Image: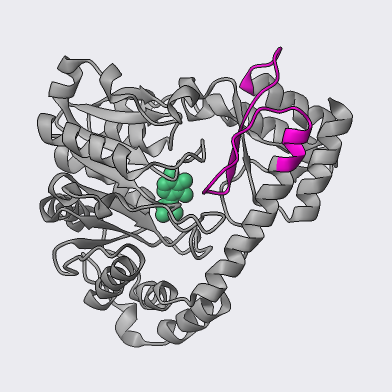
Amino acid sequence: MIKIQLADRVKNLPPYLFATIDKMKQEALSKGVDLIDLSIGDPDIPTPAHIVAAMKKAVEKPVHHRYPSYEGMLSYKEAVADWYKQRFNVSLDPKTEVLSLIGSKEGIGHIPLAFVNPGDVVLVPSPGYPVYPVGTLFAGGESCIMPLKEENGFLPDFKAIPEDVLKRAKLMFLNYPNNPTAAVASEGFFKEAIALAEKYNIIICHDAAYSEMYYDNQKPTSFLDVEGAKDVGIEFHSLSKTYNMTGWRIGFAVGNKDVIAGLGKIKTNLDSGVFQAIQEASIVALQTEDSILSRIRKTYQDRRDALYEGLKGLGIHINKPKATFYLWAKVPTGFNSTTFVAHLLEKTGVLGTPGVGFGAPGEGYIRFALTQPVERIKEAVERIKNAL
Ligand SMILES: *Cc1c(COP(=O)(O)O)cnc(C)c1O
């Protein structure tokens, strides 16, 4: 028997803060609790039928059964460029400014390998998607946290970042509309970020996974639609949330061609691209009629309204989301995020996610995901009312 020892980069992974919650959830389920799970950021609505139909056709084609091209089929990348033009009026060269990804998580996790040397700094928003600091750690980089505070509209305060940190920074992750805070960013904020990136030579990686999950017809802007963005960075995108395709594993990165090429180099050496049948079905997805997407947005908006109005009525401090399918609420006094989640689960069977799980600055908040039907959300509010 040999001694199996984990590498330091795995040993050094931050503790999995959702482990206690997972355990409590399993215990509740085994006791037969009627759980209302609002903890998972995964759409409960199936992929639209026309996309599934396109996949059925594509999967029959033997040409797709072979290795795909590494950087993605040109037809898929052209569909991405067309979508960007139509949605954001941003022009992209499909050959050099678009890269297919096995879900955007894959690209986000890999990009530090292309640009970060051991000891380099990566600027990471917190609370935030855990893949930003983990990808940084795997590349030997050092995460510098940019706290997202409510008084700043959950935007990072660039002026608070020390000069020496900025000088060592190679990469900055941003994510708007934001998971978990549901904040959106203005063009002015992106301009500020671009100016900073130019001054200190920092690559900006903007994660736009939620750009199509918006409310009240207020469409979020693309980072790439801001002047100078393509000189400093890229945007990550995903079909997961827009088309309810989380299980399909497809996304893309677009923008600065040198950054795209660098990420492409890592991928060429690690993976062999996205199953072409999925790429072909995704072309159809990207051409989805707006009426279908409007219906999906309406479903989430009804849920948002039910949960937002419901919780607000109970005196819970909460900002009304303009985008994403999350609500980011302050936990009542006397609790921290973990004890409140535990309390809610025990008293009501409603499960949220403790804010601290997204990073220390998330302490004091709970995230609810709108991944249950309106009736269940109303039931959740009713139960919370009775428990408070
Ligand atoms: C869901 C999500 C993604 C999308 O991940 P995929 O790998 O494309 O499914 C990316 N970023 C954030 C912040 C997310 O919440």
The answer to if 311 sits in the magenta stretch is yes
Magenta stretch bounds: 309-337
Q: Main secondary structure of the magenta part?
A: loop
Q: Is residue 23 above or below residue 48?
A: above
Question: x%, y% of residue 38?
Answer: 67, 43
Direction from residue 86 to residue 288 in the image, left or right = right
Q: In this rendering, would 355 be left or right of 35?
A: left
Could you tell me which quadrant the N terminus lies in? Answer: top left
Q: Is residue 214 above or below residue 143?
A: below
Identity of the residue drawn at 21% across and 35% down: 171
Q: Is residue 2 visible?
A: no
How many numbered marks does the figure carry?
A: 0
Residue 264 left/right relative to 127:
left
Question: Residue 137, how many percent across, how many down?
Answer: 29, 29
Expressed as whole percent of the image width and height from the top left, the position of residue 381 reads 80, 40
Nearest the camera: 10 or 244? Answer: 244
Question: Which residue is at a point 10% across and 52% down the rendered structure image?
Answer: 258
| Residue drawn at (17%, 54%) of the image | 260
